[in-house]
Image (cartoon, helix red, strand yellow):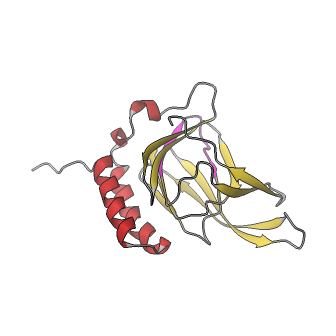
Amino acid sequence: MATATYTLGDFIADLDRITRDETSPHVITERVAPLLAKLVKNPGVVPGEFRRRPQGQPRGRYMLHRAPRFNVTAVVWGPRETARAHNHETWGVIGVIDNEIEETRYRVEEGAQAGRATLAVKTVMHHTPGAISCLVPGDEVHAMHNPTDRDTVEIHVYGKDLSGLKRKTWDADGTEKPLITPKYMNC
């Protein structure tokens, strides 16, 4: 007997139930991670037009589902594309659908000088298709890098809509800068 494919609709229904019943970022990410792992096994869950970058753009960001307690997006990283160290101000779960991504996690130590910090590398991970990464407040500062010559496709799930959310990014020397995520390319 064939098993039913886990769909984006199934995932959204499960996310709705989980985030309605639970508020702990640790518990939410623990419950969402295996579901996202099941979802990313089916690359067709992301429509074809959201599996590629807009012409001339280094990255594609597309809203797949927006809800009050979470949102689900598709992110396409161009070849060699990098997002320097940044925070999220919410929980998140990321799953790789196609190709690979390198994620560097940091511990941020506030510096003596305002607007500067020391970023200590905690770990560097290489994620391949099916890999899941969980972000929780206190452990959600990371940098992302597509080390390949092909696009990398991921699904990102966050507890807040990042579009317009005031966040932070850091230069390699620890200089802190404001980060406001632009609108998604499809809305």
Asked whether, in this view, residue 15 is left or right of residue 95, the answer is: left
Percent across and percent down for residue 37 are 37, 56
| The one of 12 and 45 positioned closer to us in this rendering | 12
Residue in the picture at 30% in, 48% down: 9
Q: Residue furthest right?
A: 113
| The one of 180 and 129 positioned closer to us in this rendering | 180
Q: Residue furthest left?
A: 1
Percent across and percent down for residue 74 are 48, 43
Q: Quadrant of residue 184?
A: top right
| The one of 83 and 73 positioned closer to us in this rendering | 73
Give the answer, above or below, for where 93 lies relative to 77: below
Q: Residue furthest front?
A: 68
Q: Quadrant of residue 54?
A: top right
Give the answer, above or below, for where 68 lies relative to 5: below
Percent across and percent down for residue 111 are 85, 71
Residue in the picture at 50% in, 32% down: 52
Residue 71 lies in the magenta-colored region: no
Percent across and percent down for residue 178 are 75, 54
**Number of numbered discs present?**
0
Residue in the picture at 59% in, 24% down: 55
Residue 150 lies in the magenta-colored region: yes
Residue in the picture at 55% in, 32% down: 53
Q: Which residues are magenta?
A: 144-156
Asked whether, in this view, residue 100 is left or right of residue 32, the answer is: right
Q: Quadrant of residue 31?
A: bottom left
Q: Residue furthest top?
A: 55
| The one of 7 and 16 positioned closer to us in this rendering | 16
